[in-house]
Amino acid sequence: MKIVFMGTPEFAVPCLARLLEDGHTVSLVVTQADKPKGRGHRLTPPPVKAFALEHGLPVFQPQSMKAPETLERLREAAPELIVIQKIRELAPDVLVVVAFGQIIPQEILDIAPYGCINVHASLLPRYRGAAPIQWAVLNGETEAGVTTMQMDAGLDTGDMLLSASCPVPEDMTAGQLHDRLSLLGAQVLSETLNALKVNALTPKKQNDGESCYAPMLDKSLSPLDWSRPAAQLHNQVRGLNPWPSACCRCQGRLLKVHASRVGESSDAEPGIVIKLNPFTVSCGGHTSLELLEVQGEGARRMSGADFLRGHPLAVGSRLEEAADQTEDRP
């Protein structure tokens, strides 16, 4: 099939790779603009662009999908799109969108005869929105998955096509689930396009009553509130790994928590260190949380035990809630 692919982050790369492996013709890759990254703010191409250029695919990076030059460039890449009524004869067979990161105008959704297929990282209709993977972990879901859908003008509200699920172990982070679902998404996309070619798909309407929203993450989610039960805090640690990371304050300084485990029961006041090996903090509901991997200000990630060697604490010390963070998003 002739395809225009729209995607930006690492999550989308396996889907683009699978399109090439399956023998599809990717006539254009549309992705977001290069952005400053790292301490040096070096302009860095998005992962999809890097992959596309490595494989000789044409790339277009619009500043906004609403800008007039965006549609004009799409027409230049595929001159047949100049005349909308000829789309069914001459345009790409289908558009594929995977974590593109911008709202796509209806004119683009209507370009291809097979419409626009989206790979969404949740079992729709649950977790519509920008951060479905992270919110699934934050909420302690034991199962996650991906869904292909026929895009419409709404936010992840299109008819569902195919889906696949995977278990979410209690120690899996959002980053690990991201990697698992990116590969699963490529497989489901391949199956969807194969079925599309032979008219073997049965689109299914989403039940809006079963939906929930997964908004973009921000640093306001990071502070650990020790009055909450340890299981909820453990999910917070997992769900915010790798970004923006759960955190607290230890001896007045910011301490990120990258890995944790629910500990033994505790009658101590929430926030009190009850054990040094492993580094354990009392939480709400007579529970406790073991801090397995942490990172102090300006320091590398390390085990809780290694952190305590350089920052001696006594049993009975208190960890405070971190009011804010000042680091920029990577």
Image (spheres, rainbow, N blue to C red):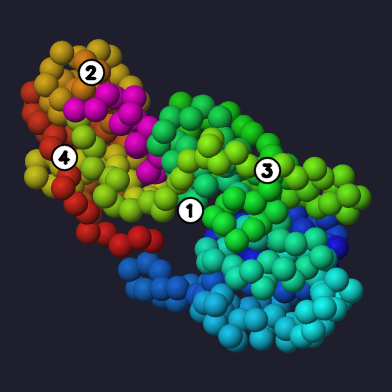
**Residue 257 appears left or right of 78:** left
Q: CA distance from mark 1 to mark 2?
A: 32 Å
Q: What secondary structure is the stretch in magenta mostly built from?
A: helix
Amino acid type, callout 4: Glu
Q: CA distance from mark 2 to mark 3?
A: 41 Å
Q: Mark 1 sits on what residue?
A: 130
Q: Which residue is mark 2?
A: 285
Q: Nearer the viewer, mark 3 or mark 1?
A: 3
Q: Amino acid at mark 2?
A: Gly
Quadrant where the C terminus sits is: bottom left
Residue in the picture at 41% in, 53% down: 216
Mark closer to the chain start, 2 or 4: 2
Distance Cα–Cα, label 2 vs label 4: 17 Å
Which image quarter holds the N terminus?
A: bottom right
- Disc on the earlier residue, 3 or 1: 1
CB under 8 Å between callouts 2 and 4?
A: no
Q: Earlier in the sequence, mark 3 or mark 4?
A: 3
Q: Which residue is mark 3?
A: 205
Name the residue at 41% across, 33% down: 139
